[in-house]
Image (cartoon, rainbow, N blue to C red):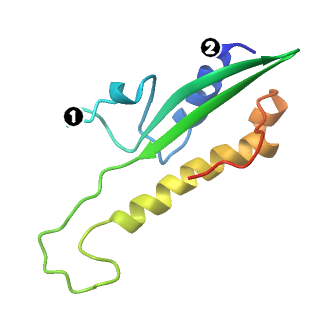
Amino acid sequence: MNYFDIIDKLKTHFDGDVLVNTVTQGNLFDIDLSKQTIFPLVHIIVNTASLEGNVVRYNISILAMDIVDITKDEDVNKFDGNDNELYVLNTQLQVLTRCYELLLRGDLWTDKFQIDGNPTC
């Protein structure tokens, strides 16, 4: 497996996720946060690659993000607030959880893309 395989498999997975509209990769500062970008967005960053015999171990950061909409209505619910932040956090965690599950025991696992350790969100 090479760098292109990793990026392509992850892009293909996220392109098929109904909760993701745009998939990008590269430096964190390459993310286009303008009004032209269609959110929700997943950004893939390959941090490092280690050669370990027949294995190449990649350290990858996957950022799942969406825009929080703030309503102009008076904040009557102190718990939920006057925005959709809880909804955004929930859906983006679902996006990352589905990818994690496929790396543990799904199609990505059978394609030899396997997770090592426990990811953090």
Q: Image height check: is 4 above or below 115? A: above
User: In the figure, residue 94 lies in which quadrant?
Assistant: bottom right
Q: Image height check: is 70 above or below 13? A: below
User: In the figure, residue 62 lies in which quadrant?
Assistant: top right
| Total numbered badges shown on the rendered structure | 2
Q: Image height check: is 33 above or below 96? A: above
Q: Disc 2 or 1, which lies upstream in sequence?
A: 2
**Label 2 environment density (alpha carbons within 10 Å; few <14, some 14–19, many ≥20):** few
3D distance between C-alphas at marks 2 and 1: 27 Å
Q: Residue at x 54, y 42 (%)?
A: 17
Q: Which mark is residue 86?
A: none
Residue of label 1: 34
Q: Residue 26 appears at what percent x and percent y?
A: 45, 22
Q: Image height check: is 43 above or below 2? A: below
Q: Secondary structure at mark 2?
A: helix
Q: Residue 58 appears at what percent x and percent y?
A: 68, 26
Q: Residue furthest right?
A: 54
Q: Residue 38 appears at what percent x and percent y?
A: 31, 37
**Label 1 environment density (alpha carbons within 10 Å; few <14, some 14–19, many ≥20):** few
Q: Amino acid at mark 1?
A: Ser
The N terminus is located in which quarter? top right
Q: Residue 113 appears at what percent x and percent y?
A: 76, 30
Q: Is residue 109 left or right of residue 44?
A: right
Q: Is residue 92 left or right of residue 98?
A: left
Nearer the observer, 47 or 36: 47
Q: Residue at x 11, y 70 (%)?
A: 72
Q: Is residue 108 left or right of residue 20?
A: right
Q: Amino acid at mark 2?
A: Phe
Q: Which mark is residue 4?
A: 2
